[in-house]
Image (cartoon, rainbow, N blue to C red):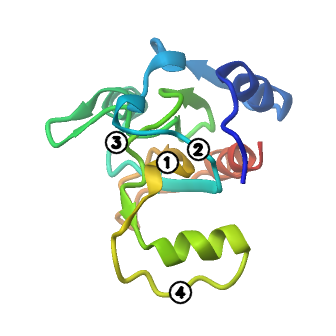
């Protein structure tokens, strides 16, 4: 369990890890905190954008869409491994999940089968979106995969 990092600490951690970082808009204050708290943090969630192109993907994750307002994550990681910071605080990246899974994450035990949606994951996880269609054909460049691992570790 961890208290969420300040925006300055997030940026410092990524730069200390040697990551290339781009700050997007007012990412430091761009969040969904009015919908509930962010923290304590118990882990990270990494998804793919189901979109093509860095500019479009970053814009989508910053602004969201008609069904889900942005930010949709904390960071977008492009094919070159650049970390685009789009939000800080609560973001719409995890949605509802199984509370038993969260308890297992906290206890660092085997995960049970996810069978119910009774716990808000947006409160407890940092989220990154990797630019990728997720169709099994869109490549995962080594730079992107390594940046995602470094982002999670930082």
Say left or right for 71 vs 12.
Answer: left
Q: Which mark's residue is nearer the viewer, 4 or 1?
A: 1
| Most distant residue in the left direction | 66
Which residue bears the numbered disc 4? 112
Which residue bears the numbered disc 3? 52
Q: Which mark's residue is nearer the viewer, 3 or 4?
A: 4
Q: CA distance from mark 3 to mark 1?
A: 28 Å
Say left or right for 37 vs 7.
Answer: left
Picture layout, residue 121 above or below residue 86: below
Q: Which mark's residue is nearer the viewer, 3 or 2?
A: 2
Callouts 3 and 4 close, C-beta under 8 Å:
no
Work out whether mark 4 precedes mark 1 in sequence or the reverse, and give the earlier one. 4
SS at mark 1?
Answer: helix
Q: Which of the two residues, 108 or 59, is positioned nearer the viewer here?
A: 108
Q: CA distance from mark 2 to mark 4?
A: 22 Å
Q: Position of residue 124 (x, y in %)?
A: 55, 52
Q: Which mark's residue is nearer the viewer, 3 or 1?
A: 1
Q: CA distance from mark 3 to mark 4?
A: 33 Å
Q: Position of residue 134 (x, y in %)?
A: 38, 61
Say left or right for 39 vs 99.
Answer: right
SS at mark 3?
Answer: loop
- Residue 105 occupies quadrant: bottom right
Q: CA distance from mark 3 to mark 2?
A: 31 Å
Callouts 2 and 1 close, C-beta under 8 Å:
yes
Q: Which mark's residue is nearer the viewer, 2 or 4?
A: 2
Work out whether mark 3 precedes mark 1 in sequence or the reverse, and give the earlier one. 3
Question: Which residue is drawn at the image coordinates 67% and 67% (left, top)?
Answer: 106
Q: Which numbered tag is attached to residue 123?
A: 1
Question: Which residue is drawn at the image coordinates 71% and 74% (left, top)?
Answer: 107
Which residue bears the numbered disc 2? 39
């Amino acid at each position: 369990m961890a208290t969420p990092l300040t925006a300055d600490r997030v940026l410092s951690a990524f730069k200390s890890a040697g990551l290339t970082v781009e700050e997007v808009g007012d990412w430091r204050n761009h969040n969904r905190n009015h919908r509930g708290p962010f923290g304590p943090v118990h882990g990270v969630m990494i998804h793919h954008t189901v979109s093509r192109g860095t500019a479009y993907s970053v814009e989508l994750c910053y602004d969201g869409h008609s069904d889900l307002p942005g930010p949709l994550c904390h960071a977008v990681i492009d094919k070159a491994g650049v970390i685009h910071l789009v939000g800080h605080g609560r973001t719409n990246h995890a949605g509802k999940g199984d509370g038993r899974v969260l308890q297992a994450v906290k206890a660092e035990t085997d995960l049970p089968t996810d069978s119910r949606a009774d716990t808000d994951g947006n409160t407890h996880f940092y989220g990154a979106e990797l630019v990728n269609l997720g169709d099994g054909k869109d490549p995962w460049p080594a730079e992107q995969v390594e940046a995602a691992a470094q982002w999670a570790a930082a």
